[in-house]
Image (cartoon, grey):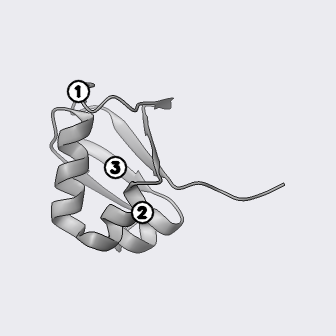
């Protein structure tokens, strides 16, 4: 299963900082995350970057392997 780590507002919306989910693509993962956590996470996910093993992945058809780690990163303000 793919390890998903949530940060900041994504962790708050998911109600957890990490979980394991089985998904075959980035799009499949997004759909499963929304189904599991509802509209609050869907709203946050629309603004989040997904990093698959440290690389940003925007293509919903990009494959995800069971050994991958996916970080869900909302935009951060700072300076």
The image shows residue 1 at horizontal and vertical percentages of: 19, 42
Would you place residue 3 above or below residue 7 in this image?
Answer: above
Q: Tell me if residue 8 can be seen.
A: yes
Question: To which residue does mark 3 refer?
Answer: 4
Query: For the view shown, which residue lies furthest in the right direction?
Result: 79
- Which image quadrant for residue 27? top left
Question: To which residue does mark 1 refer?
Answer: 61
Q: Residues within 10 Å of mark 2 (few under 14, many from 20)?
A: some
Residue at 15 percent of width and 43 percent of height: 22
The image shows residue 17 at horizontal and vertical percentages of: 41, 64
The image shows residue 57 at horizontal and vertical percentages of: 41, 31
Would you place residue 30 above or below residue 18 in this image?
Answer: above
Nearer to us in this view, 50 or 66: 50
Q: CA distance from mark 2 to mark 1?
A: 20 Å
Q: Residues within 10 Å of mark 1 (few under 14, many from 20)?
A: few
Question: To which residue does mark 2 refer?
Answer: 44
- Which image quadrant for residue 65? top left
**Disc number lying in front (1 or 3):** 1
Would you place residue 10 above or below residue 67 in this image?
Answer: below
Residue at 33 percent of width and 28 percent of height: 59
């Amino acid at each position: 299963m793919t390890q998903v780590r949530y940060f900041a507002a994504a962790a708050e919306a998911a109600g957890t900082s990490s979980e394991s989910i089985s998904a075959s693509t980035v799009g499949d993962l997004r759909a499963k995350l929304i189904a599991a956590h509802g509209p609050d996470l869907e709203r946050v996910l629309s603004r989040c970057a997904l990093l698959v093993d440290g690389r940003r992945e925007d293509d919903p058809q990009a494959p995800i392997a069971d050994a991958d780690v996916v970080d869900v990163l909302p935009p951060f303000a700072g300076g």
